[in-house]
Structure formats: C-alpha cells, structure tokens
Amino acid sequence: MNLRPIHLCLILSILAITQTHAQDTAHHKKPWYIFVGGGLTINRAFGPMISMVTSFDQSFGIKKEVQKDGLAFEIDVNFQGQISNLVYFKTGINFVQKQVNPEENSYPLYKDSLKTGYLTLPTLVGVSIPLNLNKTIYLMLEGGPCTNFKLIDKTHHGIDRYGFKTFPIVLGGQGGGGFLFRRPNGSGVQLMYTYRADITHSYDESLYWGAPNELIRTRGYQFRTHAFTFCYSWLL
C-alpha cells in the first residue's frame, strides 16, 4: 500500500491547522469588543452663571440654594480595542441626557431649567487589570476627551433674559472606573462609573445688568455629570 498520499494529506492538514491557529492567535492578541448598555446620570451645573447667582445669594443672605431634578439617563454603544494585554483604546456613540434646575431657592425671580440631549463621542485610553488567575474579573480605568453634539433641547429660561443660547457642540473630558466580568468566549458584563465635565460652555445667558456703562452681561453654564452604567459586551 502506497502511504505517500496519506502522509502528504496529513502534512498538509497539520500545516493548515497550524496556520489557522496562528491567524486566530494573532487576531485575539489585540481583540475588539463591543459594549451595549446604559444607565443613570446625575447632573449639576457650574460655571460663571452659577458663580454670579451664588454671589447674589450671599449678598442677600440666602444660604439654601439648591440644584434640583438633575437625574437623567444615557444609552451607550462603545467599541474597545486592546493595544496590549493591559492597555486599550475605546470610542463609541453615546446618547447622554443632561438636565438640572440650577437656581431653586436662589435670588433670581425667574429660574432656568436646563434639559438637553447630546450625542457624545468619547476618545478614551484605559487599562484593564485582571483581578483573578482565570482572568474573568477585570478592574477598568479609563479617561480622555469627549465631544458632545446637541440633539434635543428642551431648555427653558427666565422671561427677563435678554438672550439665551444653547451651543450645538460642547467639548469636555471624562474619566471613570469599574469592573468587567468576562466569560472565556469573550462575552461579559461591565459595571462602570464615569465622571464628565464640560470644558466649553453648554449655554450662554445674557442679563440686563443696570449699570450705566454695562447694560448687558453674559454668563455661561456648564455641566458636571456622574454616570452609573451597565453594559453587555461581545468579542468582535
């Protein structure tokens, strides 16, 4: 019996399996994951407009000013690629609703109600640190810039304002941390806390000032947002 064809087939099979394994190993050295989920946001306003209202309140002895109705939500679709075993890059498309009534119990007679939905595009770098030998539980730490594009604006401002503007693009930064629970097949769930802060103004508001040489003065609002999210992840 001529065994050469059988030997040749075995050799070709072994080479094919080896090549496939090498390609699969190279692919999974730097895998990409998709994360889909959402959660709750807690929003507060800051910036020169808040500083001015606080100054007014202090001059009139008001000490109980509060920011109300800051609870909202977000929906996330993110893509994460491993740069190394520890370091990863993340980007995505997130819908983040930011809202708050920033002047309750304060000096202004007419109050503002800030409520805007943004399409947020993050550009993040992070580290994923395994916490067990099986590498099924990871500590995630990440941060970087984000760009917010106005989608929905339901903001209301006082009728005594000279002008009020919601900016269509707001630049900001974000950072956060959490835990990833991953199965051997690459799927998993993630619990994450994220802090976002606007760098540019979200809104500008112009007020009558009353001084002879400065009848109108413009102040701005910015958001600070705490987010708590839950996401499912899959290997791409």
Image (tube, grey):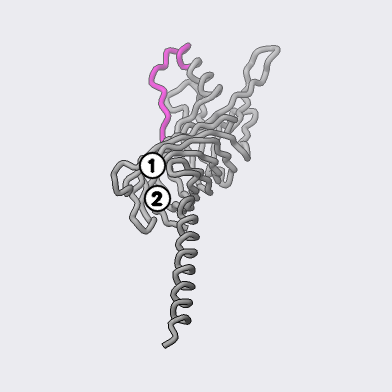
Label 2, residues with CA under 10 Å away: few <14, some 14-19, many ≥20: many
Residue furthest toward the right?
213
Q: Secondary structure at mark 1?
A: strand
Q: Is residue 90 visible?
A: yes
Asked where in the image residue 49 lies, by quadrant, the reply is top right
User: For this view, does 168 lie left or right of residue 19?
Assistant: right
**Residue 193 lies in magenta, yes or no?**
no
User: For this view, does 20 lie left or right of residue 191?
Assistant: right
**How far is the residue under mark 1 from the one under mark 2?**
8 Å
Tell me the residue at 50%/60% (across/down). 23
Amino acid type for the residue under numbered disc 1: Met
Residue 47 versus residue 119: which sits nearer the camera? 119
Tell me the residue at 47%/77% (across/down). 9
**Residue 149 picture location, percent across and down:** 59, 43
Q: Secondary structure at mark 2?
A: strand
**Residue 197 picture location, percent across and down:** 50, 31
Label 1, residues with CA under 10 Å away: few <14, some 14-19, many ≥20: many
**Residue 90 picture location, percent across and down:** 50, 45
**Residue 68 lies in magenta, yes or no?**
yes
Residue interval drawn in magenta: 57-71
Amino acid type for the residue under numbered disc 2: Cys
**Residue 231 badge:** 2
* Rendered position, 47 above or below 166: above
**Residue 129 picture location, percent across and down:** 37, 40
Q: Quadrant of the N terminus?
A: bottom left
User: Do tag 1 and tag 2 residues touch (Cβ < 8 Å)?
Assistant: yes
**Residue 192 badge:** 1
